[in-house]
Image (cartoon, coloured by chain):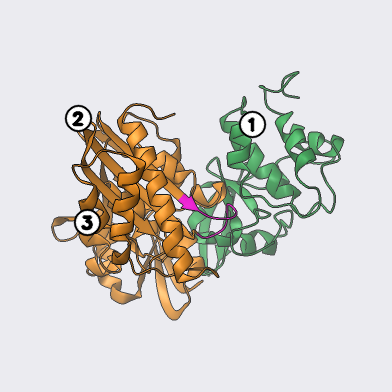
Amino acid sequence: MKQITFTLNGRKRQWDIAPDETLIDLLRRQGLTGTKRGCDTGMCGSCAVIIDGRAVNACIYYAFQVDGRTVETIEGVGDFDRPHPLQTALADAGAVQCGFCTPGFIMTAKALLDRKPNAEDADFRQHLDGNLCRCTGYVKIEQAIRSCSTAAEGGAQ
Amino acid sequence: MMNYVDFKTPASVAEARALMKELGPQASPVAGSTLHVFLRDESPKVAVDISRLGLNSIDTLPDGYRIGATSTVGDLQDFHAPGWVLDRVAREFVTQPIRNVATLGGSIIRVFPWSDLPIPLLALDAVMEIEGDETRRIAAGDFFKSQPFHHLQSGDLLTAIHVPALASGQGFGYHKERRTTTDFSRCSVAVWMALEDDRVADVRIAIGAAVPMPCRMKAMEQALKGKKPTQSNFESAVQAGLDEGHWKGLHGISNEYARHLASVIVVDMLHAATDEAKGDAV
């Protein structure tokens, strides 16, 4: 085991990791199970986290790569008492069925909206092309996420 | 994935090179890490994180761009400048979370039949910069003749890729044929063309996925030089040069279909490059 230091959801962490451990293994081993293991090959986006402002699939990212970096997971986004606007929008739109893909969608959409609050349809389509949902058919997810852009009718929530 | 028994995080090219020399074959350079999903290597390796060496900028040169090898595909996608065409290629590269970490260097140092980025680099006649005991430059045509990592000796690093900017009268076309965003390419084509007096003054055609290794289609290029950029000239040049390709269908398509697919896409991309060269590109 070897120690790495990084910022996780705003707090500095020093954790021991195995050299061949992936980031998703590390997060879930530490009890952060909001990051979901889907395909384990970087194809479904359910394990998306934000590293240095960019959405990344934690299943194909080694834990050692976050040394010195800033990581944000779904646990840092919001909770029942203080939901993030994306969480509220998804719940209000009925965009969550089994919910397994939802954290990944939120992290990917958040990474985009943090960088471009006035994101437009083309931005969403491009940035969410790595998130799969097998329940909803995407329409409600897309509507909910789009409503959080300042470019949406009525502005961001 | 790989069997990493340790990892190192060098802060400079010199430090990374020294480490890799010291570790020899045990060293495994890691930039984005997305490549490692496809690798199965049980032998113990030491990961050398080369993502923090300052090799991730895109610099403007008088005639083009020098792209740091650890620039991500997302960086190529977000960069916009005169004559820059790699954003069009980057957009078609898997999905956003992968574009955010996969690097240009990592995507070309080990080539798979379906690799995306060697194809535009062949068409653009890019030049790779390798930092060894001395700095070496290798043109794309030589770089992709065999597995590119064979060009590297212990401690060598691919540090930059030089691509020319499109000049006036030049055009570029790129198409990747796939069913879904995460699907591997079935056939990818990149075309660079220069027109003079409404004739093809120079053209480079590169193909991937429908052939075992990305390659130039030089017989087609030769047949096009001096010709007017018309549908019939494009079709006859492509038909005349098709036998040069070692067509190999991937993911359930026949070799014959791969050949046909390539012939259709090349003609389409010749038109796309022509339109841009004439200033008609959308």
Which quadrant of the view contains residue A76? top right
Q: In this view, does B92 lie to the left or right of A32?
A: left
Q: Mark 3 points at which residue?
A: B130
Main secondary-structure element of the magenta-colored stretch: loop
Q: Residue A121 carries which label?
A: 1
Pinpoint residue B10: horizontal percent, then vertical percent: 34, 57
SS assignment at label 3:
strand
Q: Which mark is residue B197?
A: 2
Closer to the observer: label 1 or label 3?
1
Circles 2 and 1 on the same chain: no
In magenta stretch: residue A48: no
SS assignment at label 2:
loop
Q: In this view, does B254 lie above or below B127?
A: below
What chain is the orange one? B
Query: How many residues crowd around disc 3 within 10 Å: few (fewer than 14), some, or many (20 or more)?
Result: many
Which circle's residue, 2 or 3, is located before the other in the chain? 3
Q: Which residue is drawn at 35% across and 66% down?
A: B213
Label 1: chain letter? A
Q: Which residue is drawn at 69% across and 61% down?
A: A38
Q: Which of A86 and B179 is in front in this view?
A: B179
Label 2: chain letter? B
Closer to the observer: label 2 or label 1?
2
